[in-house]
C-alpha cells in the first residue's frame, strides 16, 4: 500500500489519532512520511525466532473454537477465576490473517466479555482503520483471559495457566502475522526480558509465524508522542504481510 493509497477517510482517522499525516512508506524508503513521524528508521533487523513456549503438565488445550471457548469460560486453573465477572475469550474473524494479542482484560472487558472495548480499544480500532482493516477482519485476544485485580501485571503462574488457551487459538487461526501490543504480551510470546522499546521495530517469529511488537493503545493514550512509533510498527507489519520484511 503506497502513500497515495490513503483515502481521505484514512487521513482523517490519522488526524484523529494525533498524527498530522500518517502515510505508508514507499518501497524504496523505510521513513515514515509526515511532520509527526520520526526520522527514517534503520532497516529491520534479521528475524529472531522464539522457541516454543513450555506448556505446564496437564495444561494442554485441544478441541475446536467452541470447545476452547467453553474451556476458557469454565476455567478455574488460577485464582483469577474467583474474581472475574466473565472470562474474555477473544473476538473477530476465525479466518483472519491478522492476530492482535494484548496482555489481559481490563474493567470494561471483564464486564462485557470482549477484548479491547474501552478507550484503548477505540484507539486500536482507529489504528486498524488507518491501515485499511476493520475490527471484524482481525482476531483479537489476550495472553490472560481473566482480569487481574486492579489491572496489575499478570503473575508468571497465571501466564503459565492461561497461555495454553492462546496457543490453541493460534493453532486454530494460523494467522499470517501476529501483532503483539504491550510489554507483557511481547515478552511472553518471545520469551524475552528486554524492554518493549528493544523488541519493537523489527520482525520476530513465534513458532514460524511472523510477529511484530508495538506499544499498547493504553500506553499511547498516556504518551501520545509515541504514536508515530506505533505507526512505524504497523507499517512494518504491512511489509511483513506483503513479503517485504
Image: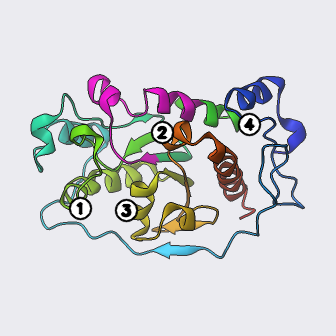
Question: What's the residue at 76%, 69% (across, down)?
Answer: 42
Q: Which of marks 1 and 2 is in front?
A: 2
In contact (CB < 8 Å): disc 1 and disc 2: no
Residue 35's place in the image compared with 207, above or below, is above
In contact (CB < 8 Å): disc 4 and disc 2: no
Q: Which of marks 1 and 4 is in front?
A: 4
Which residue bears the numbered disc 1?
156
Q: What element carries label 2?
A: helix
Q: Considering the image in quadrants, where does the C terminus appear?
A: bottom right
Q: Name the one closer to the observer, 126 or 169.
A: 126
Residue 67 in the image, given as x and y percentages of width and height: 23, 40
Which residue bears the numbered disc 3?
188
Q: Distance between the residues labelled 1 and 4?
A: 36 Å
Q: Distance between the residues labelled 2 and 3?
A: 18 Å
What range is drawn magenta here? 101-125
Which residue bears the numbered disc 4?
19
Which residue bears the numbered disc 2?
218
Amino acid at each position: 500500500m503506497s502513500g497515495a493509497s490513503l483515502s481521505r477517510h484514512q487521513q482523517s482517522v490519522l488526524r484523529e489519532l494525533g498524527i498530522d499525516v500518517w502515510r505508508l512508506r514507499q518501497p524504496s524508503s523505510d521513513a515514515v512520511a509526515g511532520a509527526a513521524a520520526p526520522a527514517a528508521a534503520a532497516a529491520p533487523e534479521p528475524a529472531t525466532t522464539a522457541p516454543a513456549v513450555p506448556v505446564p503438565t496437564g495444561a494442554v488445550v485441544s478441541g475446536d473454537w467452541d470447545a476452547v471457548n467453553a474451556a476458557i469460560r469454565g476455567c478455574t486453573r488460577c485464582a483469577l477465576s474467583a474474581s472475574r465477572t466473565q472470562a474474555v475469550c477473544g473476538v473477530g474473524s476465525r479466518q483472519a490473517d491478522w492476530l492482535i494479542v494484548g496482555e489481559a482484560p481490563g474493567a470494561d472487558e471483564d464486564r462485557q466479555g470482549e477484548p479491547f472495548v474501552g478507550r484503548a480499544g477505540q484507539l486500536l480500532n482507529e489504528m486498524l482503520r488507518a491501515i485499511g482493516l476493520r475490527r471484524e477482519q482481525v482476531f483479537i485476544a489476550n495472553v490472560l483471559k481473566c482480569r487481574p485485580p486492579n489491572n496489575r501485571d499478570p503473575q508468571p503462574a497465571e501466564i503459565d495457566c492461561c497461555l495454553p488457551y492462546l496457543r490453541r487459538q493460534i493453532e486454530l487461526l494460523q494467522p499470517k502475522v501476529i501483532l503483539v501490543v504491550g510489554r507483557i504480551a511481547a515478552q511472553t510470546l518471545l520469551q524475552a526480558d528486554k524492554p518493549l522499546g528493544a523488541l519493537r521495530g523489527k520482525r520476530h517469529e513465534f513458532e514460524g509465524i511472523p510477529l511484530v511488537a508495538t506499544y499498547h493503545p493504553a500506553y499511547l493514550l498516556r504518551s501520545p508522542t509515541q504514536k508515530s512509533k506505533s505507526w512505524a510498527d504497523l507499517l512494518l507489519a504491512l511489509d511483513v504481510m506483503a513479503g517485504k520484511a
